[in-house]
Image (cartoon, grey):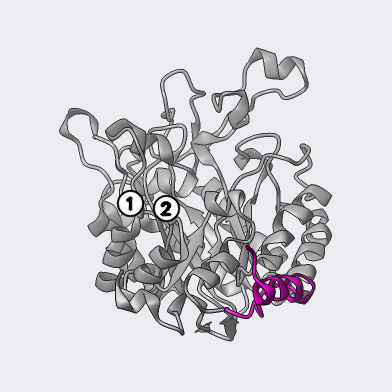
Amino acid sequence: MNARVESKTPTLFSEYRLRDVMFRNRLVVSPMQMYMTGPDGIATDWHFQHLVKWSLGGFGTVSTEALMIDPVGRNTYGDCGIWGDEHVAPLRRITDFLHERGSLALAQIHHAGPKASRQRPWEGLGPLGEAEAARGEAPWQPVSASATATLQGWQQPRALTAAEIDVIIEKYAAAAERADRAGFDVLEVHAAHGYLIHSFLSPLTNFRQDDYGGGMRGRMRIALKIAEAVRTRWPAGKPLFFRLSAVDATEPPNGGSMWTLEDSCVLARELKDRGVDVIDCSSGGIRSANSVMDVAKNRSKLRRGFQVPYARAIRSKADIPTMAVGVILDGPQAEEILQDGSADLIAIGREALTDPHWALHAAQALSADPEWHLWPRSYGYWLSYRDRIGIE
């Protein structure tokens, strides 16, 4: 094993400062959709227990699922919202507990664009139809950069007007203000996976001929305006992240162009100039139900750390901190990503679902906590005692 991974002071459990915020370690629970609210989008006790357990499990930062800035931009009727002041207090209850346990709280704000008005994943993840309407979940028309559906058979979105784009930019800014009032320490704008902002970035879905289309400068315009608007309303001392699909990860029809890694590096530099602190590096999703399905088109299994090269390239070429995500399975793998200079933060998603104590187990694997001091005191006392007496 690489000697750097065996270090007694692993980078994974070192502090990291961005603006006025100190991250106690480099581990972030990645935003993951749960589809468990009612149509009002208000977080419930379910969301409280779902999120706060990771602060007990040793993660330095815990992210919400994507919080929708507009009811029209919901994926499903089960999405959490931040489009109204009524969403603030239930979210504040969650951030207060995370802070009590020493974790930072990250809010991801989002608009699903052409992928709105869908079924929950276990219902098929397709467009809402007659069956859903019969139970009170009627479909609505999505909006997008252009009037083109994500997949054949899906609802055709309506292309936004320039005036409507201005309204949406303001909704992102208002959502940032609410996130601050709700006590979040870090804010992330979701601009990946074929959702609204990505639909403007990619030439596969943006066929506009106005200021928001055409060449790359026009296609980037909405992302940059959102970054500017959010940064002016999000406190200067708090970090701002942007999640990008570093590549479209799909073959363009008829030999056309698509969004590339070099495009992401250009955008990342522009975002940095507008006050973005970290690029969260994902990929795909532009012409599929979700980003994982793009990977499945090209191989039968997911590959460990398959998106890490994107984080490494953007970190190097755009000179901006990055967060790596995607099939990062254990502490030694995460430590090696940091030691190699591929990223500054590590986002853990599905592995955190299978093991809420993933971070604490990673510390054990890296010999960073031999005395169980990172565990909640009432856990660690007994676990350390069991270690001392031994097991036959």
Dot 2: within a 10 Å radius of its alpha carbon, few (fewer than 14), some, or many (20 or more) residues? Answer: many
* Label 1–label 2 contact, CB within 8 A: yes
User: Which residues are the magenta region?
Assistant: 370-392
Q: Is residue 319 visible?
A: no
Residue 371 visible in image: yes
Residue 234 position in % (x across, y down): 61, 72
What is the quadrant of residue 22 in the picture? bottom right
Q: Which residue is mark 1?
A: 306
- Per the rendering, the mark at residue 43 is none
In magenta segment, residue 271: no
Question: Label 1 to label 2, Cα distance in Å?
Answer: 6 Å
Residue at 47% x, 73% y: name it.
Answer: 366
Left or right side of 175 for 262: left
Residue type of the residue flagged with mark 2: Gly
Depth order, front residue of 245/144: 245
* Vertical position of residue 379 compared to residue 247: above or below: below
The 10 Å Cα crowd at callout 1, few under 14, some 14 to 19, many 20 or more, is some
Magenta span includes 389: yes
- Dot 2 corresponds to which residue? 326
Q: Identify the image quadrant of the C terminus.
A: bottom right
The image quarter containing residue 21 is bottom right
**Callout 1 secondary element:** loop
